Image (tube, rainbow, N blue to C red):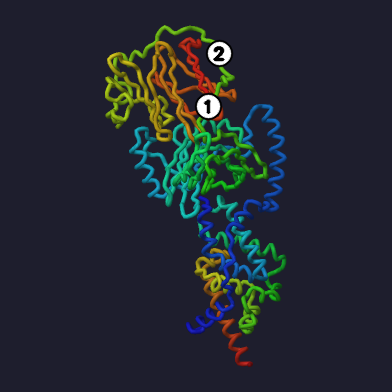
Amino acid sequence: MTRHGDSLLAERLSALEDPRDDSNWEDVLRRALEQPLERGAWLRGRRALLIAAVIAALMLALGVALAATLGGFSGWLSGKPGSPASSTEQRAFQQANARSWASFPSGTKLRRLIVTRADGATFRLFGFRSGDEICLRLVADGISGGPYMSCVPRLELEQAKAPAAVVMVDAAFGKAHVKRPARPDGFFNGVQDASASFGLAAANVSAVELKAGGKTQRVFTGGQAFLLIRRHVPFCSVVDRVFAIGAARARIAVPFRRSLCRVPSLSLKKPHYGPTRIDRKPLRRLIAWLIQREPRGLSLHQAGVPRSSLYHGPNITFARVLQPDPGNHARVVISLVGRHNAICIATISAARGGGGGCASLFDYPLAPSVSGFGGAQSALISGIASDAISRIDLFLNNGERWPVPFKDNAFVVLAPKIDFPAKLVGYDSRGRVVAIEDLPSIF
Amino acid sequence: MGASELEIEELYRRRYVAFRNVIATVAGGREPARDVVQDAFAQALRRRETYQGTGSLEAWVWRIAFRLALAAVPRDLALIESSLEEAFLEPERDPDLVDAIRSLPPRRRLVVFLRYFGDLSYDEIAETCGISEGTVAATLAQARADLLAAIDREGAEK
């Protein structure tokens, strides 16, 4: 056959081709979310549903998490969800991590989970596991704002009762277009360019449904995570319901803490669980190594923390940077301030910024601070305790009791906001309760 | 490995028309082909985590589309000749070629459509059909020869 013959054939065949483009991507998305499973999969789904119902009944009786029946979070706890980040993406993360005063280990590998576009902006969701934290990082191109990073504790996933975990809701991108004048209550109406809500999903969760402003939107899971981008979002149109859609079409409510759009009111609810009475007032109310200025942890210089960045910077006479929990990247700066050597702390977290204050250990042998306002679903509880305290436990509002990592009199623990109000309890070396601190649900 | 939603969306936006036109020759018309292609991409989205990444994403979606098209037409490929016209824009413009295509064995015909309507390379056709590149080349060469011979023959008869 000659080249001429081939060209002739190609030309005549192309004349028969239909060039009309009747594509409709939204229709594909709709079908994907509504598409019935194939027969085999449907039967498997039916069988799974039946088995799940029986197991769920047994498990609920045993108090075991339903998440396990849906594949659980094993992918996040021990596997490799998504795909490896590109070298450029990994490098950008490493550079940002190296600049942080509370960095993750240098070998932390980023996984790419979801890439999606909305009105010309591209959003990339990454994830990684570091120690006892599972973190998500959302980066956007083509719109201002971010990156947003938020972590959840490993324990939360291990004990999860729902097959999805919300990590952050209503993270704002772009500009806020404020409508003036203000409303009678002093707040403004307006529209935010974009907002993002994201989280983790168990292996068998195919989609996640999020309801906000009376509208329900479904998003696919990818890399065992989910990401909803909303554009042109009215102020206070926050995500208020989340459901995980399981393989057998099960629709399971996912608990989370709504983000606030008004000034929070202090919750007066007392924690339900944990001891309510002090067994013994502690005698040792100081931190000996600090008074003796032992060089524990790192100096500010070694840790790369500028003195000027600390609230009491000019008046600090001695400071050390501690990492109380090797499984948590957060650092606690403990310092002596002023002529009277007041003990002050500052907490540094790559995911939550900083926080802290000064404590009187004489009056309060356990001095916690809590950070985690906004749409992040975990709160970082950090602080110091006097030498009288040997062990600290966290009692959550769901009845769970978590041991709090505690070293050199400093502690940090990441906890789900949904499980507040909570209670920190300090024990002495003989197991007696020597301090109780209620942690109200103020966010 | 898996494929991202964005990658599948990009493939869809770039290649939808080619998918529809090729599938139309299997599904027996433009409308059923559109339905198959929409379902194929929907299924690709749902199952994107199972994409192994060992071959091209496009070939993976082609295979899904063919599987759905064949399931939607519960007959042997050879039996859908009568509806082949429905797959073309204006078959009456080139009845000789349409007849010649109809006379091709189904497998040979499919390779022709993947090559000329789908604009797939030899290795992509090989991956999609699960055959070697050499078989693709030989099949295409034979199909071209058959088609050109048929066209010449019919032209001469007229």
The amino acid at mark 2 is: Thr
Q: Which residue carries the number 1 mark?
A: A265
Position in image of residue A249 (x %, y %): 67, 45
Name the secondary structure under disc 1.
Answer: loop
Residue drawn at (50%, 56%), measured in percent from left and top? B7
Residue A122 vertical placement versus B112 (above, below): above
Disc 2: which residue = A276
**How far from the left and from the top, in percent, is residue A237?**
55, 41
Where, by quadrant of the figure, is residue B152 drawn? bottom right
Q: What is the CA distance from the residue labelled 2 to the residue labelled 1?
A: 24 Å
- Image spot of residue A72 (x, y percent): 59, 37
Q: Is residue A227 visible?
A: no
Q: Nearer the viewer, residue A98 or A203?
A: A98
Read off the chain for label 2.
A
Say above or below: A67 vs A363: below
| Circle nearer the N terminus (2, 1) | 1
